[in-house]
Image (cartoon, grey):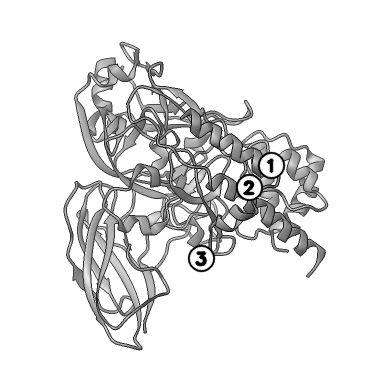
């Protein structure tokens, strides 16, 4: 087992713990009356977190402002060109604060950890 | 509500502290059927445990077996999909207003009480994500990687949009009507989520409603409390949640969510080859006919003997004419009787009986035909956004 696999396994355990805590929370029904105030608490990221490694600091600072790591982790394994296209879309379409010199290292990180060569 | 919030905060704090070794075993991960398809089952507020694609913004899928429980999808099991993370978590329905403006004679600001003064209508209608089943596209495409559970069927109650617009008085030269909800982006640069429909459609279609009830109860907040647009027969992208603004436009909407996103190739069935480029596109619109088996999964094992096969079918509003079942992968078909009719926008349940002998390997398949003559085909469509998958579903079943 490589170091990265061990770290990956630890990440999964951490994620499971957070998930379990949320799942274990009793769900109470909201009042059925119409016209009232409804207030909920969203669970945050449920322990989903970017895999550690070179470039994870970029993913943490640039991707997490708008969505959880799960959005990345659920994708089919994308190659570097496809990850680059996603990063550019996030910047150009959705306004993510990604500078030109951050695109390639972020794409390298996503390809290495969530992609295919 | 307060104690539920306190419990939640306590649990979060415990998780942050690394506590819950016992509970960790209780967190169920549902194995995926495609690469990177494993999903935790987690109960969000007002929801039973659902498959979490991503918790922020929430994208929660209905476990498919729930569709076997009844023709209506319970509110707490109904799928959830938000585009932008700026979701209001507290909504005061008493203060909520739906503003009707733009090219109208009489701008309106409608409270929930005002909406209830319009004639109340009910429609049972399927709400299906444009990208439902995206994870099955081959080759795979990026996006929300749903299995088949980004859909649900509910009884919606509310006011007809055409009645509201008649009161407002749509001006001459109106082209489209734009809808916006309370949700917003994290960055001001992110395009706000807005969808538009042609003015001719919304003023002539009595089945587009501003709904304040779902299955006889207020909508769950994550499904759009307190009011949501119901566009019967059309894909869910138009069913704007927490509806707050209705704006009559004198032009065709060119905002990002209409002009660039949620478009399908202007080809038969919205299908292209992965290598195709430069084709015209149109906004996604009416749903395409589909059917599913609900009481058996792909890979199931049956005992020898007689079994019922149950399922659902639906289309974009013409209604289901017939469903057929095959046990040999689609070589031969037999008719599967339809169950109660809840209207042409609803799931239509069907069933059939099969007799199986020990050692048999079956390939079950179901196909539906709609009243508009459209019928499911075996060959899956493909488009780069992974929209409107609708081909015949198959289920490998062995007999022990």
Label 3 Cα neighbours within 10 Å, binned few <14 / some 14-19 / many ≥20 = few
Q: Are marks 1 and 2 in contact (CB under 8 Å)?
A: yes
Question: Mark 3 — on which chain does it sit?
Answer: B
B238 vs A8, left or right, is: left
Where residue A85 appears, x then y in whole percent?
67, 49
Q: Chain of mark 1?
A: B
Structural distance between the alpha carbons of marks 1 and 2: 7 Å
Q: Which residue is mark 1?
A: B16
Q: Report whether residue B172 is seen.
A: no
Q: Residues within 10 Å of mark 2 (few under 14, many from 20)?
A: many
Callout 1 and callout 2 share a chain: no
The residue to which callout 2 is attached is A18
Residue A106 screen position, x and y as percent: 76, 48
Q: Nearer the viewer, mark 2 or mark 3?
A: 2
* Residue situated furthest bottom in the rendering: B359
Mark 1 crowd level (few <14, some 14–19, many ≥20, 10 Å Cα):
some
Residue at position x 60%, y 36% in the image: B10
Helix, strand or loop at label 1? It is helix
Q: Which mark is residue B33?
A: 3
User: Are the two marked residues, 3 and 1, in contact with CB atoms closer than 8 angstroms?
Assistant: no
Q: Is residue B387 left or right of residue B34?
A: left
Front in this rendered view, residue B362 or A34: A34
| Residue placed most toward the observer, B42 or B277 | B42
Same chain under badges 3 and 1? The reply is yes
* Residue at 34% across, 17% down: B111
């Amino acid at each position: 087992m490589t170091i990265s696999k061990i770290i990956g396994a630890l990440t999964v355990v951490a994620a499971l713990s957070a998930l379990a805590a949320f799942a274990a929370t009793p769900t109470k029904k909201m009042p059925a009356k119409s016209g009232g105030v409804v207030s909920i608490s969203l669970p945050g990221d449920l322990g989903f977190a970017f895999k550690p490694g070179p470039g994870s600091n970029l993913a943490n600072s640039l991707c997490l402002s708008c969505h959880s790591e799960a959005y990345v982790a659920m994708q089919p394994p994308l190659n570097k060109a496809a990850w680059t296209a996603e990063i550019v879309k996030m910047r150009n379409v959705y306004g993510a604060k990604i500078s030109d010199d951050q695109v390639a290292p972020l794409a390298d990180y996503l390809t290495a950890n969530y992609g295919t060569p | 509500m307060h104690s539920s919030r306190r419990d939640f905060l306590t649990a979060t704090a415990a998780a942050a502290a690394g506590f819950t070794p016992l509970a960790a075993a209780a967190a169920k991960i549902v194995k995926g059927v495609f690469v990177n398809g494993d999903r935790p089952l987690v109960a969000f507020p007002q929801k039973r445990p659902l498959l979490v694609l991503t918790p922020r913004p929430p994208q929660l899928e209905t476990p498919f077996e729930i569709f076997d429980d009844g023709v209506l999808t319970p509110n707490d099991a109904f799928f959830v999909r938000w585009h932008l993370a700026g979701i209001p978590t507290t909504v005061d329905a008493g203060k909520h207003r739906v503003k009707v403006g733009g090219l109208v004679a009489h701008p309106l600001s409608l409270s929930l009480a005002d909406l209830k003064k319009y004639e109340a209508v009910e429609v049972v209608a399927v709400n299906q994500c444009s990208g439902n089943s995206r994870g099955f596209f081959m080759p795979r495409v990026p996006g929300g990687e749903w299995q088949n559970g980004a859909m649900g069927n509910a009884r919606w109650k509310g006011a007809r949009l055409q009645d509201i617009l008649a009161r407002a008085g749509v001006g001459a030269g109106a082209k489209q009507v734009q809808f916006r909800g309370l949700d917003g982006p994290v960055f001001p640069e992110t395009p706000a989520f807005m969808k538009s429909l042609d003015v001719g459609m919304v003023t002539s279609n009595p089945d587009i409603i501003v709904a304040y009830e779902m299955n006889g109860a207020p909508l769950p907040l994550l499904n759009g409390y307190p009011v949501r647009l119901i566009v019967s027969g059309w894909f869910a992208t138009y069913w704007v949640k927490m509806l707050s603004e209705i704006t009559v436009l004198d032009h065709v909407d060119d905002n990002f969510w209409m002009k660039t996103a949620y478009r399908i190739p202007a080809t038969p069935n919205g299908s292209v080859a992965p290598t195709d480029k430069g084709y015209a596109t149109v906004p996604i619109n009416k749903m395409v006919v589909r059917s599913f088996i609900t009481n058996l999964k792909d890979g199931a094992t049956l005992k020898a003997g007689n079994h019922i096969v149950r399922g659902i079918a639906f289309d974009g509003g013409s209604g289901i004419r017939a469903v057929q079942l095959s046990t040999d992968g689609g070589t031969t078909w037999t008719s599967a009787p339809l169950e109660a009719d809840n209207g042409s926008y609803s799931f239509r349940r069907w069933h059939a009986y099969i007799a199986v002998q020990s050692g048999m390997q079956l390939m079950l398949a179901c196909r539906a035909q709609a009243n508009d003559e459209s019928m499911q085909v075996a060959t899956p469509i493909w488009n780069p956004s992974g929209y409107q998958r609708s081909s015949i579903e198959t289920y490998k079943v062995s007999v022990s």
